[in-house]
Image (cartoon, rainbow, N blue to C red):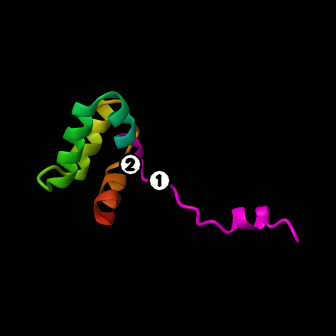
Amino acid sequence: MADMADFDAANQPRYKRAKIDEILESLDGENTTRADALRTALADRIYTSTSIARVLKGWGFDISPDAVQKWRRSR
């Protein structure tokens, strides 16, 4: 039987994880207070994508308001 491992690997869907998901995962491991605050801000539309991105940049993460908007639309 033929070894199909290379073809099977290439046939897997490829997608890039959302930056917000990476940030949340990082915060869950080190600072759950910030992770909870970020989840709350993401769920409440009173906080704009620009303001969320600004806070995250202040926390040391490189993210754009567009990435925040895209994440929100996908949820």
Instruction: Indicate the quadrant where residue 11 lies.
Output: bottom right
Please tell me how crowded label 2 is: few (under 14), some (14-19), or many (20+) other residues with Cα within 10 Å. few
Residue at 34% x, 42% y is: 24
Q: Is residue 43 above or below residue 56?
A: below
What residue range appears in magenta? 1-23
Quarter of the picture containing the C terminus is bottom left
Q: How many marks?
A: 2
Disc 2 residue type (three-letter): Asp
Q: Is residue 70 above or below residue 47?
A: below
Helix, strand, or loop for circle 2? Answer: helix
Q: Kindly identify which residue carries mark 2.
A: 21
Question: Does the magenta segment cover residue 9?
Answer: yes
Q: Give how far across and how far down residue 38 sits, in percent.
A: 23, 42
Instruction: Indicate the quadrant where residue 26 lies.
Output: top left
Labelled pair 2, 1 in contact (Cβ < 8 Å): yes
Q: Kindly identify which residue carries mark 1.
A: 17
Outermost residue to the front: 1
Task: Give the alpha-carbon distance from disc 2 to disc 1, as whole Å.
Answer: 7 Å
Residue at 25% x, 51% y is: 49
Outermost residue to the right: 1
Outermost residue to the bottom: 1
Helix, strand, or loop for circle 1? Answer: loop
Q: Between 8 and 55, which is closer to the camera in this rendering?
A: 8
Disc 1 residue type (three-letter): Arg
- Tell me the number on the disc at residue 74: none
Q: Give how far across and how far down residue 52 sits, in percent.
A: 24, 44
Please tell me how crowded label 1 is: few (under 14), some (14-19), or many (20+) other residues with Cα within 10 Å. few
Quarter of the picture containing the N terminus is bottom right
